[in-house]
Amino acid sequence: LVATVESYAPLMARAPKTFNFFINQPLVRKLSEKHIGMVDLPLLSVPSLQQQMVGHRSANMTLEQLESLNAEQKARTVLVVQDPFTSYYDAQVVADFVRLVEKLGFQPVLLPFSPNGKAQHIKGFLNRFAKTAKKTADFLNRMAKLGMPMVGVDPALVLCYRDEYKLALGEERGEFNVLLANEWLASALESQPVATVSGESWYFFGHCTEVTALPGAPAQWAAIFARFGAKLENVSVGCCGMAGTYGHEAKNHENSLG
């Protein structure tokens, strides 16, 4: 079930209220725990990302339109790479990032969803993962040829492109690069002066994958917040796996609660 989330989530997101209604039913929850081995199944985002982006230019640009942009337009265009967990279960994050890109004077373009394969890798379906990775790597390499930055909002999924894809595909991975949100923001805000810090502090709970692979990420986020006059404090937290797939498996439920 977890390994195939990228297959069924896009279909379910077409009618999120309907599926959420059934997922919330006590009988369905009991059947899920007994026969599928999953508890507390996450609810789909309402409204869906597609519904939030209706009529928005970011969701309606074709490859031909992107290729026809001149050099100046390409320099101000940002390609937003989707992932299954934010796009379908936390869609507001993606929608907000699209609007932030606009506020900073850039043109965001929401790329079509292409499965990442992280869930397949986590669950040990390595052959399936390699096929998924190859297909998506081909797609992202094609997008990379446009010469525009590509940015993803989920650290674990973005870093999967850099690590697991290289291990699975080797040279077939290609040279595409998807930036973390903080990496792109740090570059986009480079010329903006640091504002006077005021008000209450904000607190950063870094993704375990992110802070392990990129120890400088918390400091980079703090520098980004400082550009807007906000103080960001890093909070040392443990692995989020207990709240991820591990905690949703019935056999691990009690242990995940500590």
Image: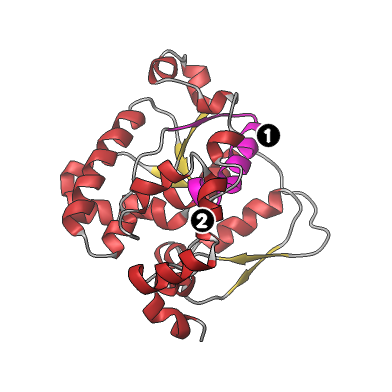
Q: Which residues are magenta?
A: 86-111
Foreground disc of the pair 2, 1 = 2
Give me the residue at 23% from left, 64% from top: 124
* Residue 33 visible in the picture: yes
Q: Nearer the viewer, residue 174 or 65?
A: 65
* Residue 186 visible in the picture: no
* Label 2 secondary element: helix
Residue holding disc 1? 103
Residue 113's image quarter?
Answer: top left
Q: Nearer the viewer, residue 212 or 127?
A: 127
Locate the N terminus and report the quarter of the image it occupies. Answer: bottom left
Q: Residues within 10 Å of mark 1 (few under 14, many from 20)?
A: few
The count of marks equals 2
Q: Residues within 10 Å of mark 2 (few under 14, many from 20)?
A: few
Q: Magenta residues: mostly which secondary structure?
A: helix
In magenta stretch: residue 90? yes
Residue 181 x, y percent position in the rendering: 52, 47
Q: Nearer the viewer, residue 12 or 95?
A: 12
Residue holding disc 2? 22
Considering every residue shown, the one lying at the far front of the view is: 27
- Kind of residue at disc 1: Lys
- Kind of residue at disc 2: Phe
* Label 1 secondary element: helix
Mark number, residue 52:
none
Residue 192's image quarter?
Answer: top right
Q: Is residue 59 above or below residue 48?
A: above
- Of callouts 2 and 1, which one flags the residue occurring earlier in the amino acid sequence? 2
Q: Is residue 42 left or right of residue 249?
A: right
Residue 198 x, y percent position in the rendering: 83, 58
- Asked whether the beta carbons under mark 2 and mark 1 sit within 8 Å of each other, the answer is no
Q: Is residue 124 left or right of residue 212?
A: left
Give me the residue at 51% from left, 28% from top: 59
